[in-house]
Image: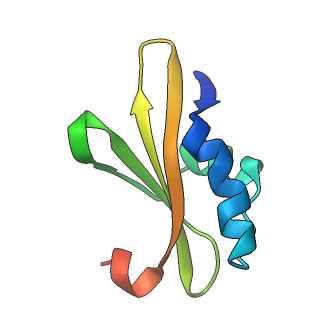
């Protein structure tokens, strides 16, 4: 597996979500990238890895797959009903 690096925005996102009552661990983001339920194309050549985290939610990780690293741009929780087929 490539080395995973977090953008400044992604690092700040942990605190932003925590303030809104949705605490996400860095390990969950790494696990999602290493074991996604699905990966889809994103904006500007980026990709989105998605993983179910509970009965109602998924975590979506927007990342760039670079030659030597995976760069996490951002991540966000979403409702399963919106993102699953």
Foreground residue, 23 or 2? Answer: 23
Q: Position of residue 50 (x, y in %)?
A: 47, 59
Please state which of residues 26 and 11 is positioned toward the viewer in this rendering: 11
Left or right of 13 in this view: 23: right
Q: Residue at x 52, y 63 (%)?
A: 76
Q: How is the image coloured?
A: rainbow
**Rendered image quadrant of residue 53:** bottom right
- Residue 12: horizontal and vertical position, in percent? 66, 49
The x, y position of residue 83, in whole percent, is 36, 75
> Would residue 79 appear left or right of 3 to someone viewing this image?
left
State whether residue 77 is above or below residue 41.
Answer: below
The residue that appears at 64% across and 80% down in the rendered structure is 54
Against 6, is 49 above or below? below
Residue 20 pos. (x, y %): 68, 77
Residue 80 higher or lower than 31, as above or below? below
Please identify the quadrant where the N terminus is shown: top right
Quarter-of-image position of residue 82: bottom left
Residue at the (53%, 71%) spot, across then down: 58
Examine the rendering and report whether any part of residue 47 can be seen.
yes
Residue 84 seen anywhere in this rendered image of the structure:
no
- Please report the residue visible at 39 percent of the width from the left and 50 percent of the height from the top: 48
Number of callouts: 0
Q: Residue furthest top?
A: 68
Q: Tell me the quadrant of the picture where the C terminus can be found.
A: bottom left
């Amino acid at each position: 597996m490539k080395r995973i690096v977090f953008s400044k925005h992604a690092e700040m996102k942990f605190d932003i979500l925590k303030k809104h009552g949705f605490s996400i661990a860095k390990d969950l983001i790494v696990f999602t990238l290493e074991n996604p339920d699905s990966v889809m194309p994103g904006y500007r050549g980026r990709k989105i890895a998605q993983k179910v985290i509970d009965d109602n939610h998924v975590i979506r990780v927007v990342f760039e797959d670079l030659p030597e690293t995976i760069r996490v741009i951002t991540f966000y929780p979403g409702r399963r009903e919106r993102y699953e087929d």
